[in-house]
Amino acid sequence: MTVDKNKYENAILYLCNGVGGPLKGKKKLAKLLYYADFDNYEYKESSKSITGDKYEAWKMGPVPRGFMEVVSRLEKKGKLKKYSVESGANYSPTEVFECLSLPDITIFSDDELSILDRVIKRYGGLSGKQLEDLTHGEAPYIATDPSEEILYDLAYYRGTDFSDVMARA
């Protein structure tokens, strides 16, 4: 699987726009990308992720290897703004991702758009910590040693119910 830079950039813009305001937290963005990629891989047994990135099992859950490089590229293009806000005593500042342009949705298939919409609807309102806890309970993360690559084929062991995927007209 190879990284699709155009889809990757536009998936980030789509997710950031879809949450209804700035997306708060690098962890949250990483987990939304995880769900988009692994759900798409598992859905209809397409065996394809949206971004093509590889994920590693970090202490805080699955993390795509190249997502911060893509964020930097989007910042340089003036399509995304990244800044930090204070999170309170004893917490690191939270990185916030704010879209400055709309995604190009013409590059996605109808199924990919349906999966992205599902991820926003199902997970977009959750915090990074809530998403971390969810991913820690899933087969791909459980079956992978710390810091190792999470194999996409493990998505099939999640047994995801896709009955909420809405077909696009």
Image: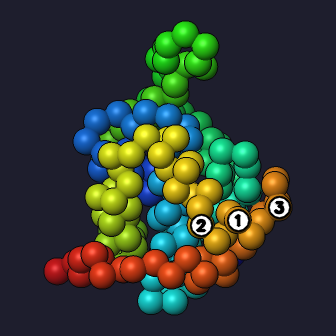
- Residue 145: numbered disc: 3
Mark 3–mark 1 Cα distance, whole angstroms, equals: 8 Å
Query: Which sits in the foreground, 15 or 108?
Result: 15
- Residue 107 falls left or right of residue 47: left
Provide residue 94's location: percent of width, then percent of height.
Answer: 52, 25
Task: Identify the amino acid type marked 2.
Answer: Glu
Q: Which quadrant is home to the N terminus?
A: bottom right
Direction top: furthest residue: 89
Picture residue at 64% right of the left edge, 71% below the top: 139
- Judge whether residue 71 can be spotted in this image: no
Residue occupying the point 70% across, 52% down: 65
Of the pair 43 and 107, the residue shown nearer to us: 43
Element assignment for label 3: loop
Residue 141 visible, this angle: yes
Check contact, mark 2 vs mark 1: CB within 8 A: yes
**10 Å neighbourhood of mark 2: few (<14), some, or many (≥20)?**
some
Q: Which residue is mark 1?
A: 142
Residue 25 at what x, y percent from top left? 50, 34
Callout 3 amino acid: Asp
Mark 1: which secondary structure? helix
Residue furthest bottom in the image: 45
The residues tagged by marks 2 and 1 sit, at their Cα atoms, a distance apart of 6 Å
- Is the residue marked by circle 3 packed among few (<14), some (14-19), or many (20+) residues within 10 Å? few
On the image, the x and y values in percent for residue 3 come to 64, 65
**From the image, which quarter does the C terminus lie in?**
bottom left
Q: How is the image coloured?
A: rainbow
What is the distance, in whole Å, between disc 3 and disc 2 at their CAs? 13 Å
Residue that label 2 marks = 138
Q: Which residue is found at the position 32% from the left and 72% from the top? A: 114
Q: Residues within 10 Å of mark 1 (few under 14, many from 20)?
A: some
The three-letter amino acid code for the residue at tag 1 is Ile
